[in-house]
Image: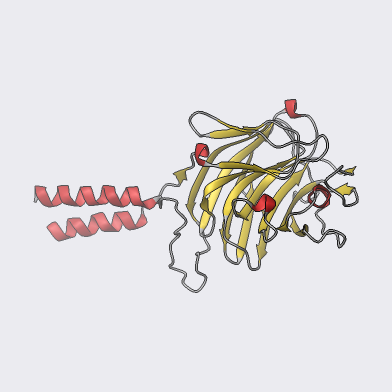
């Protein structure tokens, strides 16, 4: 009877869903690319409880990145732009980002950004590349080196600038030519591994790409857009293992596995059961 009861406990634990871990945004770090004329560094202000963060400057590309690496994770959270921010520019995320990549000639990460409206612009010094058009909609691009503001804006890599560039890889399935709206909350989910990235917006898969992707942090990204709030982020074990050769390989990215608390509770239950017997 004792062993049957224990077997029942373990069987229940094997099917009980693990809860995603809540992300504390107070543990994240802000970085910005070099300012250009009239476009300064971003200012990120987290809530006291770490449940949200707001970026308040209409400026250069700016990031707020995680304290964990992204391989093998599924991250979900919300983004909202207030009308007080005005403008119609870029909000989004980075993944595979390394601390200091804003000045790193060897940077190699993915950028998922979303433009509210198509617009032409030419940035001033120190961005020396030609101005051009930023297209409305959601896209994923690969960032290498240290791009100019114009390259971030246009998703391009100018031959005249050898220090870096932005190469667009794909556009959103239904949002590739659709902009975001003010005062509207969007839920994003990122499922990331060494060779895969899937991005969902409000439950709809918008981006699904394969390739060879660097591990690194997940971060928030704004460019020329203020009053952007990110909130209610969680992290869970993802679909794609850290080691593609070992499908059973669990994440080792520094995030406590959500199932651990359940296993601890199971241990307590087993001990209590044995004592009662």
Q: Residue 103 location in percent, x, y?
A: 69, 52
In the image: residue 94, left or right of residue 11: right
Q: Quadrant where the N terminus lies?
A: bottom left
Taking the spot 50% from the left edge, 68% from the top edge, the residue there is: 243
Image: 43 above or below 22: above
User: Which residue is at the front of the view, 207 or 160?
Assistant: 160
Image: 134 above or below 209: above
Q: Determine the residue located farthest toward the bottom in the rendered image.
A: 245
Q: Residue 133 location in percent, x, y?
A: 88, 48
User: Which residue is at the front of the view, 152 or 52?
Assistant: 152
Is any atom of residue 54 visible in this view? Answer: yes
The way the protein has been coloured in the rendering is secondary structure
Which quadrant of the figure has residue 61? top right
User: Which residue is at the front of the view, 191 or 228?
Assistant: 228
Is any atom of residue 1 visible in this view? Answer: no
User: Which residue is at the front of the view, 49 or 57?
Assistant: 57
Counting labels gives 0
Taking the spot 57% from the left edge, 65% from the top edge, the residue there is: 194
Q: Residue 88 location in percent, x, y?
A: 80, 36
Image: 223 above or below 259: above
Which quadrant of the figure has residue 196? bottom right
Q: Residue 233 location in percent, x, y?
A: 53, 41
In the image: residue 176, left or right of residue 247: right
């Amino acid at each position: 009877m004792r062993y049957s009861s224990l077997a029942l406990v373990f069987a229940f634990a094997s099917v009980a869903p693990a809860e995603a871990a809540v992300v504390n945004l107070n543990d994240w770090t802000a970085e910005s690319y070099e300012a250009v004329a009239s476009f300064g560094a971003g200012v990120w202000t987290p809530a006291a409880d770490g449940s949200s963060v707001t970026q308040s400057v209409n400026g250069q590309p700016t990031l707020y990145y995680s304290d964990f690496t992204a391989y093998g994770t599924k991250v979900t959270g919300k983004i909202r732009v207030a009308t007080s921010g005005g403008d119609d520019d870029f909000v989004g995320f980075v993944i595979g980002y390394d601390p200091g990549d804003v000045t790193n000639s060897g940077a190699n990460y993915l950028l998922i950004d979303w433009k509210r409206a198509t617009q032409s612009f030419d940035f001033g010094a120190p961005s020396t590349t030609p101005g051009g058009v930023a297209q409305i909609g959601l896209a994923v691009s690969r960032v290498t080196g240290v791009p100019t503001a114009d390259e971030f804006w246009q998703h391009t890599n100018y031959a005249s600038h050898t220090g870096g560039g932005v190469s667009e890889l794909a556009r959103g399935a239904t949002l590739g030519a659709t902009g975001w709206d003010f005062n509207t909350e969007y839920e994003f989910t990122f499922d990331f591994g060494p060779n895969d990235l899937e991005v969902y917006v409000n439950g709809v898969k918008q981006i699904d790409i394969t390739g060879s992707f660097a591990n690194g942090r997940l971060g928030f990204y704004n460019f020329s857009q203020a009053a952007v709030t990110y909130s209610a982020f969680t992290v869970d074990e993802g679909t794609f293992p850290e080691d593609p050769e070992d499908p059973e390989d669990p994440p080792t990215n520094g995030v406590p596995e959500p199932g651990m608390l359940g296993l601890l509770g199971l241990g307590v239950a087993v001990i209590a059961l044995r004592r009662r017997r």
